Image: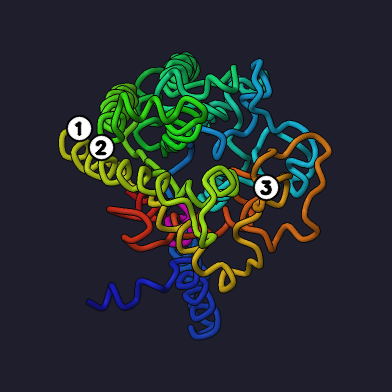
Amino acid sequence: MYQNQLSFLSPVIVSRCLVFLVVNSFPRSMSCKCLGWIIVFAVWLCLVSCRANKISSVFIFGDSIADVGNNNYIPTLSRANFKPCGIDFGKPTGRFTNGRTAFDIIGQTLGLKNFIPPYLAPTTVGSVILHGVNYASGAGGILNETGANYYGRIPMDLQLHSFAKTKDDIISLIGKPAANKLLANALFSSAMGSNDFVNNYILPPASNHTRKLMPPKIFIGILISTYRRQLKTLYGMGARKIVVTNIPPMGCCPYIRDLYPSPDQECAAFPNNLAQLFNRRLRRLLVELTRKLKGSTFVYADAYNIVQDIIKNYKSHGFEVADVSCCGTFGKHSGVVPCVPNSKVCPDRSKYLFWDPYHVTENAYKIIAKRLMDGDSKDISPMNLRALSKI
């Protein structure tokens, strides 16, 4: 009981207090040797606390919400390596937002010195890969055919194929036993599924015909079955701490709002219903995988709940506009034409929830990252990222 009550006391603070008390309270006649050993103990306590986070590398899979530049290196219409993208990052990098992504911020919070680099960057070689690699690709999906409207993209199966090559490179660098240990302690993140709806199932003009041939439950069943195979493959290659982000309320993004306008100006109901159906199946899948795959911990990151809360209470989160994109044109929500080179942007990006018709701003990602790091079971379960980083 007392341990829980005192858990807020950082070992760093305790060690500093111990040194202070020792230096100021013990008799001056006390031997330097004895005093020295007490100070060494305090420093050791501090070092133990610094090592509490066991995550030293992060491997990221996903679509445009996690892409940090892989699409720069493939022929595709899904790009973000131009101004004004990255306007608050300092330069365009291929991130589909104005600044950092949630995964960038989480990596910094975990103490990583550098952002996780894109797999296809020519500099992502050698010892760099020991700290993690980002395989995410804008327009990518769980299904290989998803995102064909953007021509080039890297679906989940190909991202896993790239990770297999990375694993071989890690083994070449440090040997198989050390590589297996590195991967077992690494954080793996997957954020997939949105494009399988937005750029596949509900993509006009063929979406009505597609839904007649394949009802939502059947399509979602195919997605879950495919995702199960992919996540088991990731486990088979050594991943043990795997965070899977669900689909956010896609019916609330400016693009969908303009595509499916609502008389009461609310979010589009049908796409959000699809997301909720998928998310319920995904949650059950992760519980199943954790139970069946020895030594695994699959964590369900509820982006839907977090983003929905931000939209409903946007003013209390510091935003002034929650339904119009900062960088986009045409349509009531500036969601018809995406952010293109040299687009005009809103005067104060910190006040906008959405950066472009599909993606949120860095300020929104800060909130998402914080709640995934330290949130309760409504945001992330069965544990948050801070707890996961310590096991």
Which residue is drawn at the image coordinates 49% and 30% (left, top)?
203
* Separation (CA) of disc 3 from disc 2: 46 Å
- Is 109 in front, or is 308? 308
* Kind of residue sitting beneath label 1: Leu
* Separation (CA) of disc 1 from disc 3: 47 Å
Instruction: Report x, y in % for residue 193.
Output: 42, 35
Q: What is the magenta segment's predominant secondary structure?
A: helix
Q: Which mark is residue 331?
A: 3
Above or below — where is 381 with respect to 122? below
Q: Earlier in the sequence, mark 1 or mark 3?
A: 1
Q: Secondary structure at mark 1?
A: loop
Q: Secondary structure at mark 3?
A: loop
Does the magenta-highlighted stretch encompass residue 50? Answer: yes
Mark 1 — residue? Answer: 293
Which residue is drawn at the image coordinates 75% and 49% (left, top)?
88
- Image depth: mark 3 or mark 2 in front: 3
The residue range painted magenta reads 45-52
Q: Secondary structure at mark 2?
A: loop
* Separation (CA) of disc 2 from disc 1: 6 Å
Q: Is residue 171 visible?
A: no
Q: Earlier in the sequence, mark 3 or mark 2?
A: 2
* Kind of residue sitting beneath label 2: Ser
Above or below — where is 180 with respect to 74? below
Q: Which mark is residue 296?
A: 2
Instruction: Report x, y in % for residue 123.
Output: 67, 22
* Kind of residue sitting beneath label 3: Gly
Above or below — where is 86 with respect to 133? below
Q: Give the colour scheme shown.
A: rainbow
Task: Using a 10 Å C-alpha cutoff, classify the residue at mark 3 as few (fewer than 14 neighbours), some (14 to 19) or many (20 or more).
Answer: some
Does the magenta-highlighted stretch encompass residue 316? Answer: no
Q: Is residue 377 visible?
A: yes
